[in-house]
Amino acid sequence: MALETAHTTDIRFEGFTPGTEIWGVTQANFLVRLSGAHGKETAVQLNDPAARMLAEATGNVDSAEFRERAAQAAGEAILTDVAARGASPESIIVASNGYFADFPDLLERVKAALA
C-alpha cells in the first residue's frame, strides 16, 4: 500500500540583520518549512561584489535599499530552488558571483525580480 502526501513548502521572509555590511554582505533572514520537516531558519548573505553586479545588470543604483531588495530576491530564488530539489537549506547561504555562475538560471530569476 502506497501512501501519497502533498508536499508543501513555505518560505517566509523574516527581515534583515542590521550591521552585516561590515562583513561585506547584506543578510536576509528566512524561515523555511518543508512538509515532513521542522522549520529552519536560513540566512542568505548577498556579498558586495554580487550586489554591485546585480545593480549594474538591472540598471539600479547600488544603494543600501537596493541591496536589501536584492538580498531578499536572491534568497527567495535560491530557497525556492533548494526546496524544489527536495534538499534542506543550509543555515547560511552566501549568494556570490561564483554561486550565480554555478546556477545561471537563478541569476536570471533574481535579475527579473529586480528589473
Image: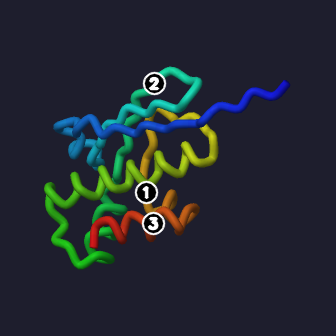
- Disc 2/disc 1 C-alpha distance (Å): 25 Å
**Of residues 2 and 58, which is closer to you in this image?**
2
- Lateral position of residue 78 relative to residue 70, left or right: right
**Of residues 50 and 104, which is closer to you in this image?**
104
Q: Nearer the viewer, mark 2 or mark 3?
A: 2
The residue at which mark 2 appears reads as 39
The residue at which mark 3 appears reads as 107
Residue drawn 43% across the image and 33% down it: 32
- In this rendering, the answer to whether 19 lies above or below 107 is above
Q: Residues within 10 Å of mark 3 (few under 14, many from 20)?
A: many
Q: Earlier in the sequence, mark 2 or mark 3?
A: 2
Q: Nearer the viewer, mark 1 or mark 3?
A: 3
Q: Are marks 1 and 3 in contact (CB under 8 Å)?
A: no
**Residue 39 appears at what percent x and percent y?**
45, 24
- Disc 2/disc 3 C-alpha distance (Å): 26 Å
- In this rendering, the answer to whether 56 lies above or below 91 is below
Q: Are marks 2 and 1 in contact (CB under 8 Å)?
A: no
**Among all residues in the image, which is located at the extreme front?**
1
**Among all residues in the image, which is located at the extreme right?**
1
Q: Residues within 10 Å of mark 1 (few under 14, many from 20)?
A: some
Residue 96 image label: 1
**Residue 113 appears at what percent x and percent y?**
32, 65
Q: Earlier in the sequence, mark 1 or mark 3?
A: 1
- Quadrant of the image containing the N terminus: top right
Residue 67, quarter of the rendered image: bottom left
- Quadrant of the image containing the C terminus: bottom left
Q: Nearer the viewer, mark 2 or mark 1?
A: 2
Kindly identify the amino acid type of the residue bearing the numbered disc 2: Gly
- Lateral position of residue 106 relative to residue 16, left or right: right
Q: Are marks 2 and 3 in contact (CB under 8 Å)?
A: no
